[in-house]
Image (spheres, rainbow, N blue to C red):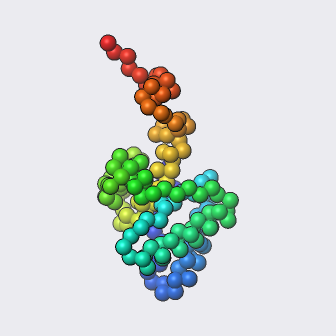
Amino acid sequence: MLLEMGVLKLASKKDPHEKLHLIHKKVKELIEEFQPQDFAIEAPFFGKNVQSMLKLGRAQGVAIASAIQAGLTVTEYSPRKIKQSITGNGNADKEQVWKMLQHILLFKKEIKHYDASDALAVAVCHHFQNNGLGNSPAKKINGWEDFIKKNPARVNRKR
């Protein structure tokens, strides 16, 4: 169930340290309000703009520190892993990811910012990784024979 989805607007703030403080404060508030059991975040990715990567890394670090301070376990997922988990394509664009999230979550509303859908994609990816695609715990599968042995009810034996 989706409880909250939004974007923290920081463009009007000039001081980079104030921005980091606001990120820490907002993450802390969300954790206190919703009492999550886990904290999942998109891992840093390597881009061409070093300054942007440094700023993003700092922001992620502050968010992670807030989660750790609250006693949450932190899991990071690569952008490719998140896209693969949601769409089946590790190179999917933001619109494809959003459309699949709408389909998975039966969510009709459109969004204004794909950053919010990125965060939702991380949460859904984390759910899939910890719970499988259904409600049962995920099973590690080593090939078709192992799958058949662990999932006998899913095998259709037609001859």
**Which residue is nearer to you in this view: 120 or 110?**
120
Residue ID at (32%, 12%) = 159
Query: Which residue is drawn at the image coordinates 50% and 71% (left, top)?
Result: 57
Quick check: 112 left or right of 122? left
Residue drawn where x is 42% and y is 28% of the image:
144
Q: Position of residue 18 (x, y in %)?
A: 56, 82
55 or 100: nearer the viewer: 55
Residue located 65% across and 63% down the image: 68
Is residue 89 visible in the rendered image? The answer is: yes
When the figure is inspected, residue 137 is found, relative to residue 154, above or below; the finding is below
Q: Is residue 120 visible?
A: no
Could you say where residue 93 lies in the image, as x and y percent from the top left?
31, 58
From the viewer's side, name the closer residue of 49 and 134: 49
Left or right? Give the position of 141 relative to 47.
right
Q: Quadrant of residue 21?
A: bottom right
Instruction: Give residue 66's position: percent from left, percent from top.
Output: 62, 67
Towards the viewer: 35 or 91? 91
Q: Quadrant of residue 148?
A: top left
